[in-house]
């Protein structure tokens, strides 16, 4: 509901027969506003939302923007029998949630790329700009950065995102923006490194442990050496040499 000071009309009358509603838009925004905004004087189907005062009118507003923008406009309501009311109107379309998330994995200092196709929302060709916003990691690039977007119903224009990491660290990300005069797309791009896998050491091919049988035999030999009296044997051997 909108209050028009000085308006003297019975609440039950049809304001649309007497009042004209017009939105004055700055020239630089006229094209985009004309495609996404509409306002008319019309009573609401909900009885509780209809004017109850002689100075009130009901407005029906449609605002369906396809890209972010801000426009300072003027709403002018004119009465045929005389009288004009002017109101400041701020149209603001904020950035939407990203359309999709794209993940790219690449080893250090090696580029990896992902390609996708995109068409315009309508059946006409449209010039576009493609870029990563200022907060995006510098390791990301997009190609092409400008050109003509193919219309809806075609195979679409191909875009290639490249990721080339130059140092190890936490995963990086960027926001890719593709926009025409009327439409806006955005994508969250994430870059990661391949998961590191430690090398697996193979079992030695050369046996480094003695078998049970060999170990037992060596133990017997050591025990036999301990029981043998080397001094007595040496003395016996010396006496045998003298007798000879």
Image: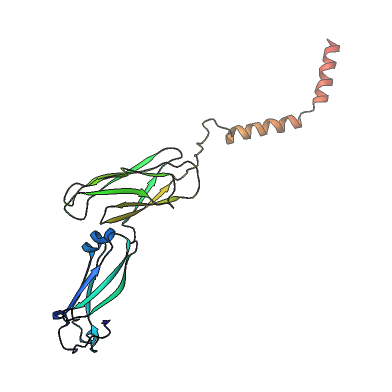
x and y percent of residue 39 in the render? 21, 72
* Quarter that holds the N terminus: bottom left
Image height of 121 relative to 164, above or below: below
Q: Is residue 183 visible from the viewing direction of this image?
A: yes
Q: Nearer the viewer, residue 238 or 114?
A: 114
The residue at 24%/69% (across/down) is 23
Q: Is residue 68 left or right of residue 83?
A: right
In percent of the image, x 30 and y 75: which residue is there?
87
Q: In which quarter of the image is residue 107?
A: top left
Given the current orientation, which residue lies at the most extreme top position? 244
Q: Is residue 201 left or right of residue 230?
A: left
Q: Pick whichever, 71 or 182, lies toward us.
A: 71
User: Is 30 on the left-hand or right-hand side of 206?
Assistant: left
Residue placed most toward the observer, 127 or 163? 127
Q: In which quarter of the image is residue 30?
A: bottom left
Residue at the spot x=46%, y=50% of the render? 171
**Residue 37 placed where, x, y %?**
23, 67
- Quadrant position of residue 228: top right
Q: Where is residue 241 in the image (x, y as percent from the top left)?
A: 83, 12
Please tell me which residue is depicted at 19% across the width and 49% down the height of the picture: 125
């Amino acid at each position: 509901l909108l209050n028009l000071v000085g308006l003297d009309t019975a609440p039950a009358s049809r304001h649309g027969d007497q009042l004209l509603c017009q939105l004055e838009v700055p020239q630089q925004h006229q094209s985009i506003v004309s495609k996404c905004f509409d306002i008319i004087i019309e009573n609401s189907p909900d009885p509780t939302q209809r004017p109850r005062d002689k100075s009130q009118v009901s407005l029906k507003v449609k605002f369906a923007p396809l890209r972010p923008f801000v426009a300072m406009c003027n709403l002018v309501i004119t009465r045929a029998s005389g009288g004009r009311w002017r109101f400041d109107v701020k149209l603001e379309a904020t950035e939407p949630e990203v359309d999709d998330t794209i993940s790219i994995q690449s080893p250090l200092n090696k580029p990896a790329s992902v390609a996708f196709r995109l068409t315009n929302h309508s059946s006409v060709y449209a010039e576009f700009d493609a870029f990563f916003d200022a907060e995006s990691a510098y390791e990301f690039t997009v190609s092409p950065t400008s050109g003509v977007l193919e219309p809806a119903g075609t195979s679409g224009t191909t875009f290639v995102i490249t990721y080339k990491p130059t140092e190890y660290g936490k995963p990086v990300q960027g926001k890719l923006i593709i926009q025409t005069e009327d439409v806006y797309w955005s994508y969250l791009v994430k870059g990661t490194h391949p998961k590191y896998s430690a090398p697996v050491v193979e079992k030695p091919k050369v046996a480094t442990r003695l078998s049970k049988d060999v170990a037992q035999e060596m133990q017997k030999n050591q025990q036999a050496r301990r029981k043998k009296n080397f001094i007595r044997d040496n003395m016996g051997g010396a006496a045998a040499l003298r007798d000879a």
